[in-house]
């Protein structure tokens, strides 16, 4: 299925506008949201593919109007409901939540950065060899 | 001047900033209250990406490849392992491929679907890399897009565009600039830019 996110080859988005000396984040809320996106999967069973799926499911007009981290905010809010947080048990059963992310980690709110950095991702694959 | 926090399509949403900040704060407070995240861990994650995980790492990889032919060979054969030799790897860099610029071929990276990027060596991607303008057009008119970065390549240089995915992330090994034979590795690394490793600039 195609979607608005599949942008390669589309016309009409205008020139690219690089920003000189761009900071890593442009606002304090972007920092916090990015950090949440990395920390929350230790406690709530979702992976990158789930985050992206939530963004790709947005209606096209809404997708185009959101900034990058705004779309992440939408996805994380959506996934934390799906992922059965303790005080907001979602409509799915715990079993189906486990199925969403087989390697669902136990809640571990004090994840040391070393563990966080080495966290493996769903469906790792071998790199394809380079074409000649 | 584009709004600092530009949307995919470059609309200016600055008026919504305050609302967004409040929504993120509310989300964080809720998750902390439920014991799902530790605010101190959030600080450390931010600190890592603002200070340690960025294009300086990739620059070290490039400089090593420039001075050490055996390393360059390993880098082009198994980038993930070779990059790991310098201590970089992990999140969003589980499988990396390095593509080498030559006098006859220039490489440039994109993620047309979203924002895939080799975090361990380049850090988090710039806003323009995630923009609709770049994602849509660099695959269709790469020379036109490169010209917007001030890079006009002669037509006899082939341009290859590499579309990254969640499973496979690319980095460009730029050409070593002429006249740098006497430079030590750390000085060479100082010449390497983020855009040089994306392919929207030469080094």
Image (cartoon, rainbow, N blue to C red):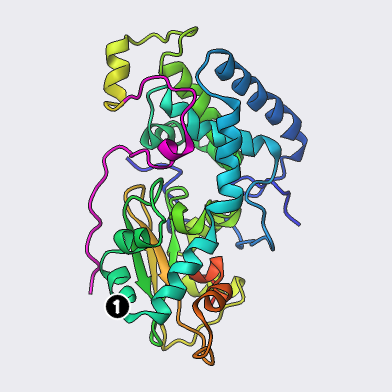
* Residue stretch rendered in magenta on the structure: A104-132
Secondary structure of the residue carrying numbered label 1: helix
Q: Is residue B36 visible?
A: yes
Q: Is residue A70 visible?
A: no
Query: Residue B161 appears at what percent x and percent y?
Result: 40, 67
Q: Residue at x 37, y 23 (%)?
A: A45
Depth check: A131 or A28 in front? A28
Chain bearing tag 1 is: B
Q: Which corner quadrant of the image does residue B79 belong to?
A: bottom left
The prevailing secondary structure element of the residues shown in magenta is loop
Residue topped by disc 1: B70
Other residues around mark 1 within 10 Å, as few (<14) / some (14–19) / many (≥20)? few
Depth check: B5 or B187 in front? B187
Q: Residue at x 67, y 53 (%)?
A: A23
* Above or below, A123 relative to B95: above
Query: Residue B170 appears at what percent x and percent y?
Result: 38, 61
* Above or below, A125 relative to A83: below
């Amino acid at each position: 299925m195609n979607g608005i996110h599949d942008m390669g080859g589309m016309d009409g988005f205008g020139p690219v506008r690089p920003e000189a000396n761009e900071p890593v984040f442009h606002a304090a809320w972007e920092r916090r949201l990015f950090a949440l996106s990395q920390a929350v999967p230790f406690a709530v069973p979702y992976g990158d593919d789930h985050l992206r799926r939530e963004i790709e499911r947005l209606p096209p007009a809404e997708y185009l109007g959101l900034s990058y981290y705004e779309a992440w905010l939408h996805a994380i809010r959506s996934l934390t409901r799906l992922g059965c947080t303790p005080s907001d048990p979602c409509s799915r059963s715990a079993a189906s939540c486990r199925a969403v992310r087989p390697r669902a980690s136990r809640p571990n709110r004090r994840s040391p950065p070393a563990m966080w950095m080495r966290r493996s991702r769903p469906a790792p694959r071998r790199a394809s060899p380079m074409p000649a | 001047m584009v709004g600092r926090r530009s949307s995919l399509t470059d609309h200016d949403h600055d008026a919504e900033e305050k609302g967004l900040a409040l929504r993120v704060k509310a989300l964080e407070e809720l998750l902390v209250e439920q014991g799902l995240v530790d605010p101190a861990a959030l600080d450390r994650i931010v600190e890592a990406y603002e200070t340690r995980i960025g294009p300086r790492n990739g620059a070290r990889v490039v400089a090593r490849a420039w001075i050490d032919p055996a390393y360059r060979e390993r880098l082009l054969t198994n980038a993930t392992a070779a990059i790991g030799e310098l201590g970089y790897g992990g999140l969003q860099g589980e499988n990396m491929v390095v593509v080498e610029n030559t006098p006859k071929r220039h490489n440039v990276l994109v993620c047309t679907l979203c924002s895939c990027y080799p975090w361990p060596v380049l850090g988090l991607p710039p806003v323009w890399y995630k923009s609709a303008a770049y994602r849509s057009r660099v695959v269709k008119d790469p020379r036109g897009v490169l010209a917007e970065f001030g890079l006009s390549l002669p037509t006899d240089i082939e341009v290859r565009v590499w579309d990254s995915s969640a499973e496979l992330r690319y980095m460009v090994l730029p050409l070593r600039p002429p006249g740098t034979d006497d430079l030590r590795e750390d000085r060479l690394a100082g010449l390497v830019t983020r855009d040089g490793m994306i392919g929207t600039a030469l080094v």
